[in-house]
């Protein structure tokens, strides 16, 4: 998958806890619409033009546009 085939949903803010949770900011009007999200594609610093797929176990809306 390339960057041209995707759109940027948001960005990662920080890690949360010890179980591998991440806090993300979704740049959308309604973060609840993405509760059934199963996969995200991340551009890593070493290879910014390539995307790496990561499976999502659960999306948990937080305050504002933040998602856990």
Image (cartoon, rainbow, N blue to C red):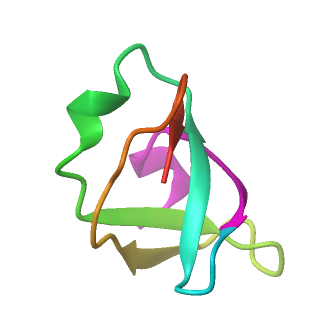
Where is residue 33 drawn, in percent x and y?
23, 30
| Residue 46 within the magenta-colored segment of the rendering | no
List x then y, in percent, for residue 5. Answer: 40, 49
| Depicted 63 relative to depicted 58: above or below | above
Q: Relative to 58, does residue 8 appear above or below in the rendering?
A: above
Q: Which residue is situated farthest in the right direction here?
A: 46
Q: Eyeballing the image, is 63 above or below 3? A: above
Evaluate whether residue 8 shows in this view.
no
Q: Residue furthest bottom?
A: 19
Instruction: State the count of labels.
Output: 0
The one nearer the camera, 6 or 37, is: 37
In this view, the residue in front, 50 or 40, is: 40
Residue at x-position 60% and y-position 55%: 23
Side of 26 relative to 57 (left or right): right
Q: Position of residue 52 (x, y in %)?
A: 51, 78
Q: Is residue 5 magenta?
A: yes
In x, y percent, where is residue 53? 42, 76
* Residue at 53% in and 27% down: 65
Q: Residue at x 23, y 64 (%)?
A: 38
Report whether 46 appears left or right of 32.
right
**Going by the picture, which residue comes out furthest to the left?**
36
Residue 59 position by quadrant: bottom left
Q: Which residues are magenta?
A: 1-15
Residue 27 vertical position relative to residue 61 in the rendered view, above or below: above
Regarding residue 55, the answer to whether it shows in the image is yes
Which corner quadrant holds the N terminus?
Answer: bottom left
């Amino acid at each position: 998958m390339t960057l041209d085939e995707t759109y940027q949903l948001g960005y990662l803010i920080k890690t949360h806890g010890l179980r591998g949770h991440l806090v993300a900011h979704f740049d959308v009007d309604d973060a609840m619409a993405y509760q059934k999200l199963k996969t995200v594609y991340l551009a890593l610093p070493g290879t910014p033009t390539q995307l790496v797929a990561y499976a999502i176990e659960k999306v948990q809306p937080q305050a504002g546009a933040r998602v856990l």
